[in-house]
Image (cartoon, grey):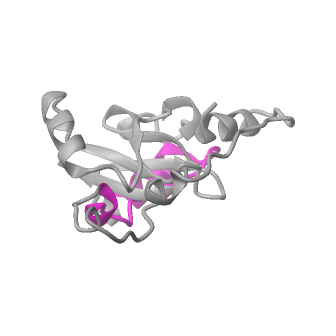
Amino acid sequence: MSARAAWRLETLGFTRVYRYQPGKADWLANGLPTEGTQANVPRAGQVTRAGVPTCHLGERVGDVRSQVQVAGWDMCLVVTDDNVVLGRLRGKALQDDPAALVDDVMEEGPTTIRPGTLLADIVPRMQQRHVASIVVTTPDGRLVGVLFR
């Protein structure tokens, strides 16, 4: 099970959630510095835009919409107190009833990539699928930022 799925289960009240923590491959996935012949190969974490507006379960859409507009973005990521991405608000969801809860209108589990993902691999995939942006998280599901095509 992914870290995001485990965190979501915890927010839904499950108390005994376990997740295997991988080892060696986490270094690149976490966007940590590298050396050697591949050190200068462009990766997602190098061009990811931080500062995306975030909100939490239980917040009202109207309050979130105001924050998003002030920040100059067109989306908001729903995160836990530990900054784990649970969902996304954009488009119609942000224009929804101002009294609606984020929980009820968010897109659960948006597609994410890791900071160590090679740009040469992800950019063509984004172009083929006509995706303008993708969320970048650590292997534990913690928000790094958003990569724009």
Residue nearest the viewer, comparing 9 with 67 = 9
Please name the residue shown 65% across and 44% down the image. Answer: 58
Residue extending furthest front? 36
**Residue displayed at 55% across by 48% down:** 141
Side of 90 relative to 144 (left or right): left
Q: Residue furthest right?
A: 16
Residue 139 versus residue 96 in the image, above or below: below
Would you identify the image quadrant in which residue 129 lies?
A: top left
Residue, x 62% and y 41% (percent of image)? 3
Which quadrant of the view contains residue 130? top left
In this picture, is 6 found above or below 39?
above
Numbered marks: total: 0
Q: Position of residue 75 (x, y in %)?
A: 35, 48
Nearest the viewer among 52 and 58 is: 52
Decide if residue 65 is in sight here. yes
Q: Quadrant of the N terminus?
A: top right
Residue 83 percent location from the top left of the image: 58, 57
Span colored in magenta: 44-68
Q: Is residue 11 left or right of residue 96?
A: right
Q: Position of residue 52 (x, y in %)?
A: 38, 60
Is residue 101 visible in this depiction of the protein?
no
